[in-house]
Amino acid sequence: MDIKPAFSTPLAFAGMNAPEALNAQLRELFLACEAQGPKFANPDPYTHRNDALFESSFTLFDWPHDPIAKLRDFCWSSLYRVIGELNQYDTHTLQKLHIAHESWFHVTHRGGYFGVHNHPLHSWSGVYCVCQDGDNPDSDSGKLTFINPHAMNTMFIDMATHRMKPPFSMGNLSIRLQPGQLVVFPSWLLHEVTPFEPMDDGLRITVAFNARFQMQGVEPPKSPFAP
């Protein structure tokens, strides 16, 4: 019997080599920005969250700070590798694929969470973990949870289906990101962050981005009414 996955959803994981020094610099920068409040905050948030979570404006990768540039380069190189692998693009083709993006950071304190959402008008999204301190790693605290996109898969469940192995299992996928870890996923995929519950004053700090692309030499169709 040949069983193959159909309608699969790609998740890609990358780890930064020796991320400790960079993450310490990012943590210091982000906490300083959070302390200044509205100057650096997202002025128009739309996803449900609470006051224990600080979200920055969506221009992070344009900031003129060396740690931001290093993280941006890591994220973009990882993203282009994912695109190249999944689309079977060679280096020459990838060089013609030009990126537009949004990027921001979250600082999450005790009780902070982020509601179910996706990222319209983009093709790929990513989350990088700067730190997650003070909570029980075996709990559901501060987990990035992807919602199973097969909406009809729970219309009937019995013992013949409820313990199927990945990638055929029916439940959601919850991930506790490690410092220096990046996950890349399709922007349409619904996800949330469960409440962060540290034992003390621990923090969860992440960086996120959305990306969309245009291929050089490939123009969008023109309206028949265009001059």
Image: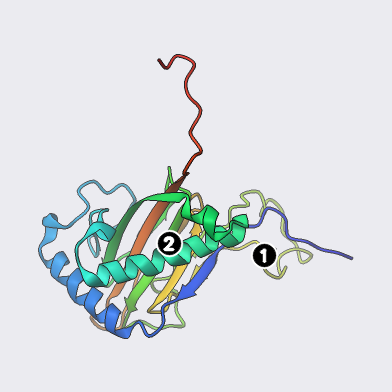
Work out whether 41 lies above or below 223: below
**Earlier sequence position, callout 1 versus callout 2:** 2
Residue at the image point whose x is 68% and y is 50% from the top: 155
Judged left or right of residue 218, residue 164 is: right
Give x and y (percent) for residue 188.
50, 49
Screen quadrant of the C terminus: top left
The amino acid beneath tag 1 is Ser
Give x and y (percent) for residue 203.
27, 76
Callout 1: few (<14), some (14-19), or many (20+) C-alpha neighbours within 10 Å? some
Residue at the image point whose x is 43% and y is 42% from the top: 121
The mark closer to the camera, 1 or 2, is: 2
**3D distance between C-alphas at marks 1 and 2:** 23 Å
Give x and y (percent) for residue 33.
15, 65
Screen quadrant of the N terminus: bottom right
The amino acid beneath tag 2 is Gly
One can see residue 38 in this view: yes
Circle 2 SS class: strand
The residue that mark 2 highlights is 126
Give x and y (percent) for residue 122.
44, 47
Q: Which mark is residue 169?
A: 1
Callout 2: few (<14), some (14-19), or many (20+) C-alpha neighbours within 10 Å? many
Judged left or right of residue 167, residue 194 is: left
Judged left or right of residue 36, residue 80 is: right
Q: Which mark is residue 214?
A: none
Seen from the viewer's position, the closer of residues 147 and 63 is: 63
Circle 1 SS class: loop
Residue at the image point whose x is 53% and y is 66% from the top: 12
Seen from the viewer's position, the closer of residues 100 and 160 is: 100
